[in-house]
Structure formats: structure tokens, C-alpha cells
Image (cartoon, rainbow, N blue to C red):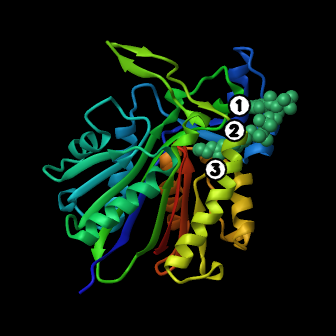
Amino acid sequence: MARYSRITGTGSYLPPDRITNDQLAARLAECGVETSDAWIFARTGIRARHFAAPDVASSDLASEAARRALDAAGLMPSSIDLIIVATSTPDMIFPSVACIVQDKLGIHGCAAFDLQAVCSGFVYALTVADAMIKSGSASRALVIGAEVFSRILDFSDRTTCVLFGDGAGAVVLEASDKPGLLASDLHADGKHVGILCVPGHVSGGGVLGRALLTMDGKAVFKLAVSVLESSARTVLQKAELSEADIDWLIPHQANIRIMESTARKLNVPLDKLVVTVDEHGNTSAASIPLALDVAVRGGKVRLGDTVLLEGVGGGFTWGAILLDF
Ligand code: UT7
């Protein structure tokens, strides 16, 4: 019998400190950086974001999201045989966040590793987990996106620091005889490394170079709009489905203008677009599983719906997954 993978539970976690645009603008004004709720909302659709407390790491957010996904799937942590964490803000250089999460959940022995594809990380991680399940090397995977981007923001750069937030989302992906992950499409083009990066690195016990996020927003915007449409069309073609079959579009939550433009190009009505960027900001690899969980718990995404997930970000990386949820 053919072997496929299906999502059987979702979960998410946001740190409790919710910062509105007005609150952020007031904090930035104290350092002479000028911005406003009006500018941020009009250009991005963001109203608020959550920031983790200084002693909270990606693994803390990831573990909580994973516990909620396990509860939703009705599974004990011990039944998990693969953990993949998509993150660009790991707790430490090594070991991986996945190993730390494994320990926090009390799981022992299963494969666990991080995957780094920035804001496309969750789409990459889910694709890898699906392949490992199909090949028989795993049967029950935790796939998590977790980030503390507040740690790598330059709060003197108003063009980037207003955009990002912290959070985590997780799914349980299980082997099944019925296809859940219908098609996937992944890409990268390293020639665009410089348009979105944190160029600093650790050497000789110190940090060399700038360890803060740098972005050419306009270049990212232009590329994002074009690749999201082409990747969506590729997965639809692979699954032999059409735009009209999409019940829910869940793109990476970076900017409402990019998301709505993608929906329009795909003829997906805006009421089928899942939007959490207003409340979460851009949480990088966490944004898609966070949005998926909000849509599931909010009664939007239901069993059997056709859901299109789309990631895009640093690398430059991008990709899409079509799900029979
Ligand atoms: O997760 C990876 C994916 N990342 C993305 O998808 C981000 C993609 N890019 C974007 O979302 C948008 O390019 C931004 C939201 C970053 C910027 O929006 P924009 O419409 O491209 O604005 P802009 O860069 O053209 O800036 C317009 C004006 C500038 O002023 P001048 O030169 O016209 O006088 C900026 O200095 O807005 C100014 N500005 C701000 N003003 C108030 C830039 N940031 C701010 C700010 N508050 N925070």
C-alpha cells in the first residue's frame, strides 16, 4: 500500500508581551527613531507583534507549540520519531533547537535536527518530513517553526524593526494511507543572499560583522510577489488541481500587500486568505504554522479542505505546499 503523510494536529504559542504599533513607536521615539501606527499599518497590515522576554529562547516557544500540537493530535510525546525545527534564531550555535526541544518534551532517541531556510523554513521542513515519512524512515514527526527575531532587530532601523515578531507554530505529521501533503515545490537562489541577511558570525569567542537583520525591502517585495505566484501554480499543476480548488491560502505572513497581491494573481477571494500578520507581525519560519493553527482553532480550516501554504524569504528561498488537510 502507498505510504503518505497527513497533518493530525496543530499548535502554536506566542509570548505574552504584545506590543502595539503605538507602544513600539513610543519606545523608538525615545531613541530618536520616528515611526507611527499609521505608516506601519498602511505599508504592512501590522497592528501588533509579540516579543519574548530576555530569558525566553526559541526552544521554549517551540516546546509549548509542540505540546499543543501533540494534544490536538491526541498523542504522547514518546510516540514521536522525528523532530524538525525550522529556525534562524537558534538558542545557541549548537546543539540544535530540535535537540533542546526533544529534551524539554522528554523524548529520547528519535532523530532531531534544525533546518535553516529563513522565512521559507517551515515549508522546507514539512517537505523534508513528508519525504522521510514516505521513505519509511519516520512515522510520526513534529515539524515546528520557532523564532525570536526580536533578538536580531536593529531598533535604530525603522525600515526593519517594525516588521518582525516572536512566536512558534507546530504540526504533527503522521504516516497515512491517504495523501495529506499533495504536492510540494522548493527553490533557492543564492545570488540574492545580500537582500535579506544577518551577516555577523562568531569567531574566536566574539561576534564578527553585523549580527543584526539587514533588508532591502523593495527588492524582497518584488521577488516575493513573483515567486509566490509561480510556486503556487507549480504545486497546483503537480496535484492536478486548479485555483478554484483552493479552500484556504496561507502565505508567509510578511506584508498584507504581498499576500493580497498573491491572492489576486491566483484568483483566490480575499475571504479565503488567512491573515495573522496584523496581530503577529512577521515571525519568519513560525508564521505559516502559527497562521495554520489560528485558522484551525478558529474553525476556518477543516478536515478535507485544500490548503495552499507558501513561504518566501532570505536565501533567497521560496516554496509552496498543497495540503488535503
Ligand atoms: O520575511 C521575508 C519577507 N520580507 C518581506 O516580505 C518584506 C518585503 N518588503 C516590504 O514589506 C516593504 O518593502 C516595506 C514594508 C519594508 C517597506 O514598504 P515600502 O512601501 O517599500 O516603503 P519604502 O521603503 O518605499 O519607504 C517609503 C518611505 C520612505 O521615506 P521617503 O524616502 O519616501 O521619504 C521611508 O524612509 O517610508 C519611510 N519609512 C518609514 N516611515 C515611517 C520606512 N520605514 C518607516 C517606518 N515609519 N517604520
Q: Label 1: how many residues lie within 10 Å, few (<14), some (14-19) or many (20+)?
A: some
Query: Callout 3, which amino acid?
Result: Val
Q: Label 2: how many residues lie within 10 Å, few (<14), some (14-19) or many (20+)?
A: few
Which disc is residue 188 wearing?
A: none
Q: Mark yes or no: residue 46 visible.
A: no
Query: Callout 2, which amino acid?
Result: Gly
The disc, 2 or 1, on the residue closer to the chain's N-terminal end is: 1
As displayed, is residue 119 above or below residue 197? below
As displayed, is residue 150 above or below residue 127? above
Quadrant into which the N terminus falls? bottom left
Mark 2 vs mark 3, CA separation in Å: 16 Å
Residue occupying the point 50% across, 65% down: 297
Which disc is residue 277 wearing?
A: 3
Mark 1 vs mark 3, CA separation in Å: 16 Å
Residue 282 rendering spot, x and y as whole percentages = 59, 44
Q: Which residue is mark 1?
A: 159
Q: Label 3: how many residues lie within 10 Å, few (<14), some (14-19) or many (20+)?
A: many
Can you tell me whether the CB of the residue at mark 1 lies under 8 Å from the nearest atom of ligand 1?
Answer: yes
Q: Which residue is mark 2?
A: 217
Q: Which is more toward the observer, 149 or 63? A: 149
Q: Which is more toward the observer, 138 or 295? A: 138
The disc, 2 or 3, on the residue closer to the chain's N-terminal end is: 2
Specify whether 283 is left or right of 218: left
Mark 2 vs mark 1, CA separation in Å: 8 Å
Residue 289 rendering spot, x and y as whole percentages = 47, 56
Q: Are marks 1 and 3 in contact (CB under 8 Å)?
A: no
Can you tell me whether the CB of the residue at mark 2 lies under 8 Å from the nearest atom of ligand 1?
Answer: yes
Residue occupying the point 41% across, 43% down: 116
